Image (cartoon, helix red, strand yellow):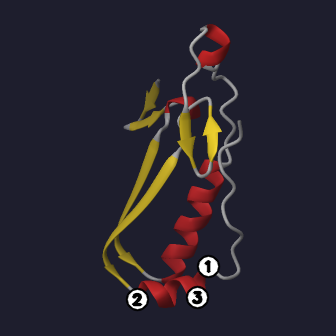
Amino acid sequence: MWEVGGVETVPVECVHVVIEVRSRLDAPALRETWDKLTRLKRFPKTAFIPLSQRSAVRPAIYAYGKQWDYFPTHVYVFAFENIRLDHAQLHTLSDRPRPTLDSP
């Protein structure tokens, strides 16, 4: 791991969960957060060597309707104040593509 100026950098292979906490989640903040977390989930975990290649035992991690050799990154967003979620989804994310899952 690497730290400079209070910011710690870790390899994406070590990231299992990302939590975004905001004081207020309005339409622009939701758009920004959605785009940021979508980019994060697209980072390939290329330095990861699956246990199945190192051992006779194959782990079974099932998430998002498929089997993974590693734990896919989960993302969560929390806010203390927000707009109505049904309104946010219809009017804020309708122009955004669904995030693709982690690259194997």
Above or below, comparing residue 63 to residue 44 in the picture? below
Compute the Cα span from label 3 to label 1. Answer: 6 Å
Say how many tags the image has: 3
Judged left or right of residue 3, residue 104 is right
Residue 6, image x, y percentages: 37, 37
Picture quarter with the C terminus: top right
- For label 3, the residue is 90
Residue 99, image x, y percentages: 66, 60
- For label 1, the residue is 93
Q: Which amino acid, mark 3?
A: Leu
Q: Which mark is residue 84?
A: 2
**Mark 3 or mark 2: whose residue is earlier in sequence:** 2
Above or below, comparing residue 3 to residue 82 in the picture? above
Above or below, comparing residue 41 to residue 25 in the picture? above
> Regarding mark 2 in the picture, which secondary structure is present there?
loop
Residue contact between numbered discs 3 and 1, judged by CB atoms under 8 Å: yes
